[in-house]
């Protein structure tokens, strides 16, 4: 009988790609997916450790899986928390059978044979890298009409609040032919390109020109929709904007984090609300149907009432479709961990609630404004679809008639809105798959 595995993934889309790679490796080892935790011989949790809330969620997931697994099964913790806090996990949770850093073997058979180590990527400039990268490992075909594809690992930026470079290493870009081969093999209608710093793809050099715009253009020749997540605002060039607008998905996921210029400099980041708003307005002039997403950090050390007011004013002006609001989390080893000016927790909570209320109201207003319009949607599963305005697993959905086949495009009229979700009627005509 084939051995069975259960793989639970926490965190961002980049982690999901890692899990797909791990699933492919386990399949090559003779494992098959289990119907549930209690039926698995091998239980794996791919953790997140970006902020304190994510670490708590990862620890809760580990405890939950440990309680659910059957006697004799093996519990393995991998991912960011394993890479960052492996020694503490081993010490504090003896129920864990193994803690595996990035790319280390999950199955005991692989560990004994020394398999699963893979080929270490070369890092431009000779910087340190994790023991093994998952980037170029094979993965199974996509189970949905869309899939994330990671084009690079690591990050060369040193934002004041972020510890990712300390455990993900410096940026390592994949060869474009490897990315395109993976896209083609997935058999999807939409590919979502992800990386810690997507717009810097190829700048680590070493093997000729590997830039994001040519990659997006080549990917568009393989799939109808190409979506980009996590763009640093200073890299949003005219050329990149044109490539995104031609990709079938006029969706801009911009890593803004704040709008106050003094605070952004304290965060070791570029820009300010005036620059951000001007760029967004220019894109909307070119493409009124474009959708925008961003995240903001509230309560960073030294944040004043003036800084917070600047962020509120920017949010009101920019009218972003989707916003994530996070309270600052102190991360060991980061620049911000040593800064003075800690914002009291009750004040942070108050500011988070104020910004979140404003942004949620804007989102609902913008969703309601779509009622009566026509949108091209990709059907993900019976009754559920998305237009270019909704990234998978992150934003709202479009409810469509149950008889629309998954994996197909349809032009539908939006007939209602409920919170972040939209309701659509029957198809109104043939669709070529391009965003409208």
Image (cartoon, grey):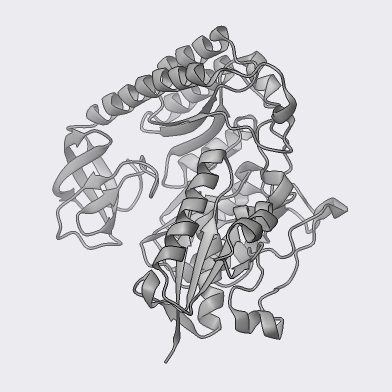
Tell me which residue sits at (42%, 44%) in the image.
Answer: 249
Number of callouts? 0
Q: Report the residue that reaches farthest toward the bottom.
A: 1
Give the image location of residue 220, x and y in percent: 49, 55
Q: Report the residue that reaches farthest toward the right.
A: 126
Position of 23 with respect to 239 (left or right) is left
Give the image location of residue 64, x and y in percent: 42, 59
**Which corner quadrant of the image does residue 2 belong to?**
bottom left
Give the image location of residue 185, x and y in percent: 49, 71
Along the viewing direction, whichever of 85 and 257 lies nearer the viewer: 85
Along the viewing direction, whichever of 249 and 308 lies nearer the viewer: 308
Tell me which residue sits at (59%, 33%) in the image.
Answer: 236
The quadrant of the rendering that contains the N terminus is bottom left
Q: Is residue 212 visible?
A: yes
Along the viewing direction, whichever of 171 and 336 lies nearer the viewer: 336
Along the viewing direction, whichever of 88 and 230 lies nearer the viewer: 88
Tell me which residue sits at (68%, 63%) in the image.
Answer: 133
Give the image location of residue 68, x and y in percent: 39, 66
The quadrant of the rendering that contains the C terminus is top left
Position of 255 with respect to 411 (left or right) is right
Tell me which residue sits at (74%, 26%) in the image.
Answer: 338
Q: Is residue 6 above or below residue 335?
A: below
Q: Is residue 171 visible?
A: no
């Amino acid at each position: 009988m084939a051995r069975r595995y259960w793989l639970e993934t926490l965190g961002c889309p980049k982690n999901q790609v890692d899990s797909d790679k791990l699933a492919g490796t386990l399949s090559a080892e003779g494992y098959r997916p289990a119907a549930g935790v209690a039926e698995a011989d091998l239980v794996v949790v791919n953790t997140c450790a970006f902020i304190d809330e994510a670490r708590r969620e990862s620890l809760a997931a580990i405890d939950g899986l440990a309680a659910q697994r059957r006697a004799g099964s093996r519990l393995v913790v991998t991912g960011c928390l394993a890479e960052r806090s492996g020694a503490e996990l081993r010490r504090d949770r003896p129920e864990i059978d193994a803690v595996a850093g990035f790319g280390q073997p999950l199955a005991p058979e692989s560990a004994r044979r020394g398999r699963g180590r893979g080929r270490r990527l070369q890092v431009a400039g000779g910087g340190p890298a994790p023991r093994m990268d998952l980037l170029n490992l094979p993965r199974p075909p996509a189970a949905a009409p869309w899939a994330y594809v990671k084009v690079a690992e690591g990050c060369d930026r040193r934002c004041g609040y972020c510890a990712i470079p300390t455990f993900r290493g410096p940026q390592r870009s994949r060869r474009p032919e490897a990315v395109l081969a993976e896209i083609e093999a997935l058999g999807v209608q939409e590919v979502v390109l992800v990386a810690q710093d997507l717009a810097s793809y190829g700048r680590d050099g070493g093997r000729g020109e590997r830039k994001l715009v040519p990659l997006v253009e080549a990917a568009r020749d393989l799939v109808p929709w190409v979506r980009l997540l996590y763009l640093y605002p200073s890299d949003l060039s005219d050329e990149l904007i044109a490539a995104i607008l031609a990709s079938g998905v006029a969706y801009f996921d911009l890593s803004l984090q704040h709008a106050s210029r003094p605070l952004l400099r304290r965060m070791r980041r570029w820009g300010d609300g005036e620059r951000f708003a001007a760029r967004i307005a220019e894109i909307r002039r070119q493409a009124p149907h474009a959708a925008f997403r961003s995240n903001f950090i509230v309560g960073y050390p030294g944040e004043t009432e003036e800084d917070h007011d600047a962020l509120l004013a920017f949010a009101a002006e920019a009218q972003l479709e989707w916003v994530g609001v996070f309270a600052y989390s102190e991360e060991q080893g980061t620049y911000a961990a040593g800064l003075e000016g800690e914002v009291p927790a009750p004040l942070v909570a108050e500011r988070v609630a104020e910004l979140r209320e404003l942004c949620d109201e804007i989102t609902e207003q913008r969703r309601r404004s779509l009622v009566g319009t026509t949108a091209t949607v990709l059907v993900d599963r019976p009754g559920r679809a998305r237009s270019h305005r909704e990234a998978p697993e992150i934003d709202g959905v479009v409810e469509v008639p149950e008889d629309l086949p998954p994996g197909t495009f349809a032009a539908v009229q939006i007939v209602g809105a409920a919170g972040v979700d939209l309701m659509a009627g029957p198809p109104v005509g043939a669709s070529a798959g391009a965003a409208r």
